[in-house]
Image: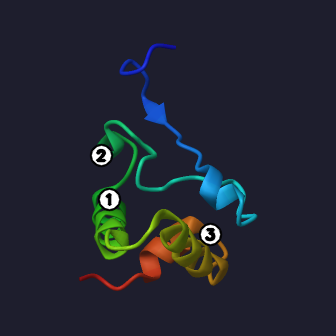
Amino acid sequence: EFKGTGNMELVLDRRIAEQFYYPAVNIFKSGTRREELLLQEFQLSKIHMLRRGLAGHKPLEALQRVLSLLERYPSNAQMLVDLPSK
């Protein structure tokens, strides 16, 4: 596949893998196009809020925070429902 034509890009980070976090996803460089077509409005707003909160962190720190948050919930959907709004 040619870069720029795909719908989703997953970027792995060697520095994260060296710390034994798998999958070693760089959450800042990974994403999908047109996510507004895949998610409900409340989900999208919560995800944007979460991304803004992680923006000042290094990729490994951001991944650690997201994993820590996800461990508290039975599903990603439940985590989004329970996240406070702004």
Residue occupied by mark 3:
75
Tell me where residue 37 appears, x and y as whole percent.
33, 40
Residue 62 left/right relative to 42: right
Q: Residue at x 31, y 37 (%)?
A: 34
Q: Which mark is residue 10?
A: none
Residue occupied by mark 2:
36
Query: Badge 2 local density, few (<14 within 10 Å), some, or many (20+)?
Result: few
Tell me where residue 46 appears, x and y as whole percent.
33, 69
User: What secondary structure is found at the residue carrying circle 1?
Assistant: helix
Q: Which mark is residue 44?
A: 1
**Vertical placement of residue 73 versus 50, above or below:** below
Name which of mark 1 and mark 2 comes first in the sequence.
2
Tell me where residue 52 appears, x and y as whole percent.
28, 70
- Viewer-nearest residue: 40 or 10: 10
Q: Residue at x 48, y 56 (%)?
A: 27
For the C terminus, the quadrant is bottom left
Kind of residue at badge 2: Glu
Res. 12 image quadrant:
top right
Q: Residue at x 60, y 80 (%)?
A: 68
- Viewer-nearest residue: 78 or 24: 24
Kind of residue at badge 1: Leu
